[in-house]
Image (cartoon, rainbow, N blue to C red):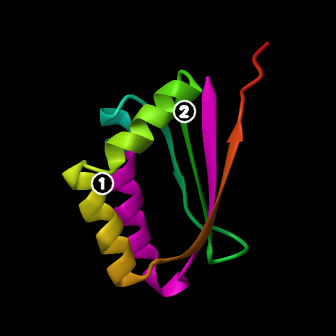
Amino acid sequence: MITCHLKYIIDPYQVPAFEAYGKKWIQIVNRLGGQHHGYFMPGEGANNIAFALFSFPSLTDYEYYRNQLLTDAESIETFKAAEQNKCIISYERTFVRPVFE
C-alpha cells in the first residue's frame, strides 16, 4: 500500500471553495481505485493549512490513477475550478507507508 499525504497552503478567504474541491476529490479518488481518508481543514491554529490523505494498493495503481486524471472530465473540471477561484496557493505531496501492528 502507498499513501499520499498532501499539505495545502490555502487562501483563508476561500475555505468554502477549497472544501468543495476536497469533497469532489474524495469521490474522484474513490471512483478511480483509491481509498480516500479525507480532507482535514483548518481548525485551531493556522487558518491556511489543510491536509489530505489517500491510498492505493500499489505505486502501479497510483500511477494508473494519475494517468486517468489527464482524460477524466470530472478531474479536469475540478482542477479548473480551483485554478479559477484560487483557493489553493501551493501544496506538497509526500508518499508514506503505513505501519500496522
Which residue is drawn at the image coordinates 37% and 73% (left, top)? 82
Asked if one can make out residue 35 in the rendered structure from this viewpoint, the answer is: no
Which residue is drawn at the image coordinates 30% and 54% (left, top)? 75
Kindly state the secondary structure of the residue where label 2 is placed.
strand
User: Residue 75's mark?
Assistant: 1
* Kind of residue sitting beneath label 1: Ser
CA gap, disc 1 and disc 2: 17 Å
**Residue 61 or residue 9, whichever sits in front:** 61
**Residue 37 or residue 71, whichever sits in front:** 71
Residue highlighted by disc 2: 55
* Kind of residue sitting beneath label 2: Ser
Mark 2, Cα crowd under 10 Å, few <14 / some 14-19 / many 20+, is many
Q: Residue 81 vs residue 98: left or right?
A: left
Looking at the image, which residue sits at the far left?
73
Along the polypeptide, which appears first: circle 1 or circle 2? 2
Q: Which residues are magenta?
A: 1-26
Vertical side of 66 occupied by 23: above or below: below
**Residue 89 or residue 48, whichever sits in front:** 89
